[in-house]
Image: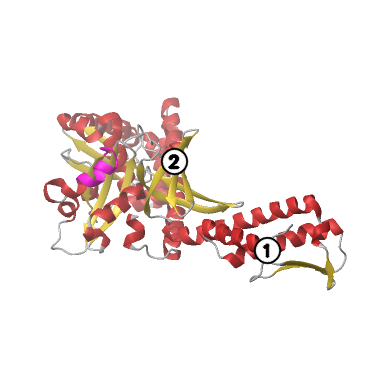
Amino acid sequence: MFNAANFLQRVEALAKERGVDKSVIIDHIERAMQQAAQKRFDATGDFTVTIDRESGEIRAFEDDKPVDLETLGRIVANVAKQVFVQGLRETERDRLYDDFSPRLHTVVSGTVMREEHGMAIIALGGRAEAIMPKEEQLPGEVYRPGAVVRAYVLKCEKKGSRLRIVLSRTHANFVRELFRAEIPEIADGLIEVKGIVREPGRRTKIAVASTDPRIDPVGSCVGMRGSRISKVTDELGGEKIDIIPWAEDSAQYIENSLKPARILRISYDHFRDRARVVVSQDQLPLAIGKAGQNVRLSARLTRYKIDVMSEEAQTEKRQKGSEELQLLIDAKLLDDFLRETFLDNHLDALSVLAAQVPERLVEGLQGAPVDLELATKLIAKAEELLTPEQRADKQKLLEQRAEAERRAQEEEARAIAAAATAAAQPAPTSSSAAS
């Protein structure tokens, strides 16, 4: 027999357990019973179920005529239970989403619950659970049950009746937020993070600039005897972090990004969006880094393709380019002065010249006596002189240019999307960023 008082006690206990209002649960029960009973009676009229919030008494009506609930049967009760559970899950999901979505793109702390197929399942409190996929975990880290971890909230989205929260310890913004938490000058806006690139678990390069000339941005980030940066490094399992002073001048920025290597010269290939960096032979391994890591991260940070070479290699390349351009001198299209100008601008191969667009060639050689007519003739003659090997080099250059343009468009789209997301998000509080 139905016990109204016991029913209300259970509703109150469930409301407390799930962290939702008692009236919300009763609303779900009413809707669930109404849907199930209406199907059971094949009701054609206006079928309603009401639950008294004070007494717990349940009544059913069809067109204002009472319906005996005892005739509903076990099937209706099971259907009502299913509908109720589904509705309750959705309500809980919405509540968790409202509570947690403001913490998107911040760093949170959680407790590892278990591991499933390489994913770490992490409890965040308040019945919220998150996943950290294998690709978002630092290489070599082991997440044991009960361990407390900090991670970056990468996603917070509704998936069916559940809330899907994805955490990351490999995202570059995880390092950015750790710096914000550990370095007050960044949190206060006195130091700006201009760029950050990362190979998780191995190395990070972060460029910083000060909005106050009295503040040393690199020294402030490092801290007294490395006290500040060591906290970030420890959180990342010993990952190496290079803090670089940002510079508006591209050459200086590239030079800073390649430290500790000492740079002799930097020149730009405006026709292929590359920078050529010349170092002494003994500095070459340091500039390139282990497995090319240093120059690779520098290229990503400065957004220049960087070619690092020794003085000897630079001299050899220029000599080879001079010999190739001699063919254009023989064709009466170049003179010695223009050949040196071309070599200075990295137009040091017939394949590079043949891959140019006349308008861009004229624009890139501002100040040189090259008009559109001469540029067109030079490119056509270079194309005519290409060997099969050089023709393959030209095709490779064209493919690289197309790929670079595609990546630039993607970067711009990501930057626009990130700016829009940041503008839509409320500013994180200090408690949410460190929780």
Residue 256, percent across and down?
20, 46
* Residue 4 image label: 1
Kind of residue at disc 1: Ala
Residue 193 counted in the magenta span: no
In three-dimensional space, the C-alpha distance between marks 1 and 2, rounded to whole angstroms, equals 38 Å
Residue 406, percent across and down?
47, 46
Residue 215 relative to residue 117: left or right = left
Residue 354 visible: yes
Secondary structure beneath dot 1 equals helix
Q: Residue farthest to the bottom?
A: 64
Task: Looking at the picture, tell me which residue is in the foreground, 256 or 21.
Answer: 21
Residue 288 relative to residue 71: left or right = left
Residue 89, percent across and down?
60, 54
* Residue 113 image label: 2
Tell me the quadrant of the picture where the N terminus can be found: bottom right
In which image quadrant can residue 272 be found? Answer: top left
Secondary structure beneath dot 2 equals strand
Label 2 neighbourhood size at 10 Å, few (<14), some (14-19), many (20+)? some
Residue 265, percent across and down?
18, 41
Tell whether label 2 touches label 1 (CB within 8 Å).
no
Kind of residue at disc 2: Met
Residue drawn at point x = 59 percent, y = 61 percent: 9
Mark 1 or mark 2, whichever is nearer to me: 1
In which image quadrant can residue 242 be found? Answer: top left
Tell me the quadrant of the picture where the C terminus can be found: bottom left
Task: Looking at the picture, tell me which residue is in the foreground, 307 or 182.
Answer: 182
Task: Looking at the picture, tell me which residue is in the foreground, 84 or 55.
Answer: 55
Stretch of the chain drawn in magenta: 230-239
Q: Earlier in the sequence, mark 1 or mark 2?
A: 1
